[in-house]
Amino acid sequence: MSYWLMKSEPEEVSIDDALALPAVPWVGVRNYQARNFMRDTMRIGDGVLFYHSSCAEPGITGIAEVISGSYPDSTQFDVSSKYFDPKATPENPRWMLVDIKAVRKTRLLSLSEMRNCEHLAEMLVLKKGSRLSITPVSSSEWAAVMALLDE
């Protein structure tokens, strides 16, 4: 089992939105490294830290899990979508996604609280300049986050 941190702007999909849905297709990823994580590495059952970004208080707001293998992101073919990619075709898709399912909402685990935890010192989301929307989380980082959330 692997673990991931997946960022979502609450105006796009919040943890409350995700909890109300049977599945959330993780559309709109347009970074090759993040796409490759979904396409090549994520597996059904992997754990997800649901992270709100680009908001007043960014941080982890819930726990989710990957519930599908990767498949083409249909927004790349939709000319009316902000995620449209004119170079993508159904025969040769450029962008992939996975579906996730929210498991539970947590209290907000803020960036500052995460930065104050020595067990999270190497967590990618805390690195200066880290802007990836999807990052791997080690099993020890996952355990540290779970311990912080259960305090």
Image (cartoon, rainbow, N blue to C red):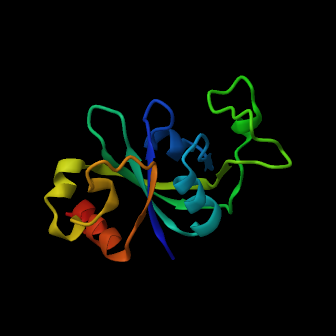
Percent x, y of residue 78:
75, 30
Above or below, 49 against 138 in this view is: above
Q: Residue at 25% of width from left, 64% of height from top?
A: 150
Return the residue found at the far front.
87
State the residue in front, 144 or 42. Answer: 42
- Residue 44 appears in the rendering: no
Return the residue found at the far top.
80
Return the residue found at the far right.
91
Q: Residue at 35% of width from left, 69% of height from top?
A: 142
Percent x, y of residue 139:
37, 75
Q: Residue at 59% of width from left, 54% of height from top?
A: 35
Percent x, y of residue 33:
53, 56
Above or below, 98 against 53 in this view is: below
Q: In the image, 112: left or right of 138?
A: left
Q: In the image, 89: left or right of 131?
A: right
Above or below, 17 against 63 in this view is: above
Percent x, y of residue 66:
57, 61
Q: Residue at 43% of width from left, 47% of height from top?
A: 7
Q: In the image, 18: left or right of 87?
A: left
- Residue 61 appears in the rendering: yes
- Which quadrant: the C terminus? bottom left
Q: How many marks?
A: 0
